Amino acid sequence: MLKKRTGLILVISAPSGSGKTTLCKRFLQVSSSFTFSVSFTTRPSRKNEIEGVDYYFVSEEEFKKMIMDEEFVEWATVHHQLYGTSTRFLEKAIELEKNVILEVDVKGGVQIKKSYPQAILVFLLPPSWQELQKRLKKRGTESDKKIKERVNRAREETKYAPAYQYFIVNNDVNEALKDLLSIIEAERCRLDEKQKSKLTDLLSK
Ligand code: 5GP
């Protein structure tokens, strides 16, 4: 029998404040076959964040050593802090044909697609820049200056959206989740090269 695809690499990118973390958490609650790729960062943890669940929080020195040891598939400086995706984790997940979800910035997403062309890139957009600013203020974790910086960066990041295969406008998290689940279902049914050769085999029997 031809099985649906597994071993999906799903990359979600979005300007901060677009509701990406909430969407990913909701997605993981209903998609138990997916594992979250926990990134490494030099950013201090926010309240409610858990070591090893949200991020691995490391010092700049440790992070730089990891770069030297080529432990990252990709890494980037975002808002003056370093963030990176573990090669070891991703390679292991691929080997076990696990479905993985990664939450990285746009440059990271583009880089992952280069290394893993099978990756599915999804860009999440806020309904408007005003709404984004409002959400960042409500979060209350950043100063006005930092919020301004994040909105400016969001505008910059959105320039990369055309490199992505899918985009979702996050007006409402339930609707955004439905969109994301539809994308996954479509991708699971899509014939990739491996599936195509299996199908050819089946048809020739
Ligand atoms: P935050 O500090 O708000 O958690 O994340 C800031 C930005 O860093 C977000 O756009 C987030 O997607 C991105 N980010 C988190 N982990 C990684 C990573 O491993 N690599 C890259 N390139 N970006 C990341």
Image (cartoon, rainbow, N blue to C red):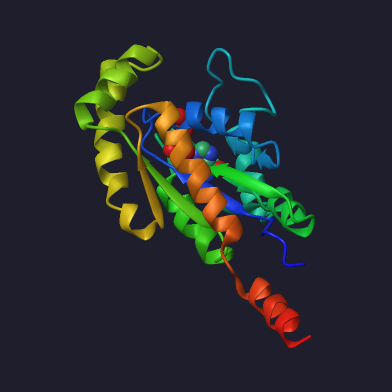
Whether residue 58 is visible here, answered yes or no, is no
In terms of depth relative to the viewer, which is nearer, 95 or 6? 6
Tell which residue pokes out farthest to the bottom in this image: 204
**Residue 99 at x, y = what percent?**
67, 49
Residue at left offset 30%, top offset 38%: 154
**Residue 32 at x, y = what percent?**
69, 36
Q: Quadrant of residue 129?
A: top left
Residue at left offset 37%, top offset 59%: 163
**Is 185 displayed left or right of 179 in the figure?**
right
Residue at left offset 74%, top offset 82%: 201
**Is 160 displayed left or right of 60 in the figure?**
left
**Is 183 displayed left or right of 71 in the figure?**
left
Q: Quadrant of the N terminus?
A: bottom right
Q: Quadrant of residue 29?
A: top right
**Is 66 displayed left or right of 176 in the figure?**
right
**Residue 79 at x, y = what percent?**
39, 34
In terms of depth relative to the viewer, which is nearer, 162 or 32? 32
**Residue 30 at x, y = what percent?**
62, 32
The answer to whether 164 is drawn above or below residue 16 in the figure is below
Residue at left offset 35%, top offset 33%: 170
The image shows a total of numbered marks equal to 0
Q: Quadrant of the C terminus?
A: bottom right
The answer to whether 127 is drawn above or below residue 97 in the figure is above
Whether residue 103 is visible here, answered yes or no, is yes
